Amino acid sequence: MESIIKVTHLTKVFKEVTAVNDLSFTVQQGDVYGFLGQNGAGKSTTIRMLLTLITPTEGEIEIFGYNLLRHRKEILQNTGAVIERPDLYKYLTAYETLELFAKMSGIRVSRQSLMEQLELVGLAQRAGSKVRTYSQGMKQRLGLAVALVHNPQLIILDEPTNGLDPQGIADIRNLILMLSQKLQKTVLVSSHLLSEIEQIANRMLIIDRGSKLVEGTVSELFSPDDTVIYIETADNNAAAQLLRSGEYSSSIITTEASGIELKLRKDQIPALTRLLVERKIDILGISARHSLEDYFLKITTANQHVEPFKN
Amino acid sequence: MWSLLKIELFKVFKRPRTYIAFIAVWAIVTLIQVAIYVDGAKYMDFVLKDVKDNFDVIGNPLNGYFVCFIILQTLLIHVPLLVALVSADMIAGEANMGTLRLLITKPISRTKLLLSKFLASAIYALILLIWIAILGLFVSMLVFGTDGLMNAKSYEIIILNGNDIFWRYICAFGFAAIALITVASLGFFFSIFAENSLGPIVATMSVIIVFTILTTLDIPLFQSVKHLFFTSHMIGWKGFFEMKLDADGVSIPGTIRNLPAVLKSAGILTLHIVLFTGAAIFIFKRKDVLS
């Protein structure tokens, strides 16, 4: 498979602060590549280097097989981006905004084509409204339309769901999935939320303090054996007794008055619930948590100053 | 490049702030014209009080050319502030809005982006000057009529014939265009360092005020260097309203007394434009955009 982005030993030093440290990764064609890390981990600095906003101190970036600094124009002609907040010209309408950035990208786009782009992000009805009247979610969708207006092959999204309400987050997630699955775009999307990335990405990279911690496919990282569930029943003592006596005894992590935590494979969950129901123990709730989340929190909070609160 | 320039002009003239300058100029010019229309005779008496006993004033000294001269003397001190409002906002305003990073991710070079922005601010300054010319010169000619122009200086009074003035105004406005573009380039230069436009606007005006004070003060320390200050050359347009004298000390119509000095001032201002704009491009090309 063709590499769309190839980053090799990338480093950025701001005065005495190393924001990105010897980072290497590869994004393949068709990937939705999740770029994960806590705030200040170096995600935005890396993305800004990919978009020529910041010059690397060391290292090399190749996009579409070309060196970024030597072939900047050709690469950016085929790249669309939304960087952090969706900041646009508040005094322009959505249509004017899209037309302006299409021209800046060096392409002529018909009115119909621009309206189709706005339709794609659900803003066709508000095409004539000034951006200042838009909600945060609408601005973010318009930002995405701006990134797509010149039909780029690669789309780079830096924290695209920041500041959005749940509906706005779902809208952006659906748009990213549509871009990847329907329009065959390669997408690099950064976030500090694992839950967001795991729903859309097929590959991911976790960084902390500018350095790579782990990279791989989501299926590799989310091992089915490592699923942790928390189960609440009407009688947790009876449930705990039942599970300890049977095949689930080795799966139990903790038993508390409020519920039981178990580590098991996803395909074991139906049998577990059936067992509890057969023994007339009412299930009040089951929540699943991947061990990757624990891993992510563990490796990325190791250096925080405030210890996690434990009741 | 033309396409980029059109985009920048579109953005400049879409912003309500841009029109503040046009409204301000209209208000100031109209106020001056109304004041002179209502009370001009008294004003002329005051101007001519020292020479009235020795000279007969024939014709209409309070004509459109004279009114325009007063307007230019008043406005060309304040117009730089109005120009700085737009030029100093060109980059800093984009950084403040958060749109600068979006512009830089587009497939255009930073040099072209900056040049198109600078040209847009220069065109804005030119349009503002044309607006001043329409209101200050043409409306004044229409309202007050035309006749000879009396240019009263501290040590002489220069009388220009009515048919020897219009071309001088065209030249003066051309010179003023260079002066205003110099201010625009200074504001533009400061604009690349800031993330909101207030700082560059204040910095531009501070430089103009400080240099103007240094230019007017007769302090020996600054005498030798003040010809290098661009503010010393911004009033060079007045040179177009002085005539050469013949051997008998009589003015020669259709001449400019010290054309080389006027051209030198224009050249120094142009050099400043190149310097400020070139420095802005040089620095911005290497700048990390963190806004």
Image (tube, rainbow, N blue to C red):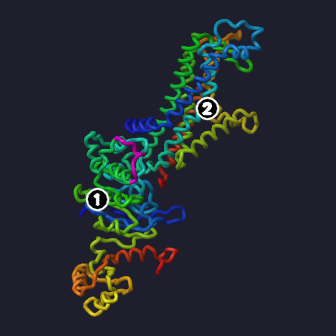
> Would you name the residue on which mark 2 appears?
B78
Magenta span of residues: A128-136
Q: CA distance from mark 1 to mark 2?
A: 54 Å
Q: Residue at x 40, y 69 (%)?
A: A207
Q: Position of residue B123 (x, y in %)?
A: 48, 32
Q: Residues within 10 Å of mark 2 (few under 14, many from 20)?
A: few
Q: Position of residue A301 (x, y in %)?
A: 45, 74
> Would you name the residue on which mark 1 appears?
A174
Q: Are marks 1 and 2 in contact (CB under 8 Å)?
A: no
Say above or below: B122 vs B172.
below
Q: Secondary structure at mark 1?
A: helix
The numbered mark 1 sits on a residue in which chain? A
Q: Residue at x 36, y 41 (%)?
A: A96
Q: Amino acid at mark 2?
A: His
Quadrant for residue A193, please give it. Answer: bottom left
Q: Are marks 1 and 2 on the same chain?
A: no
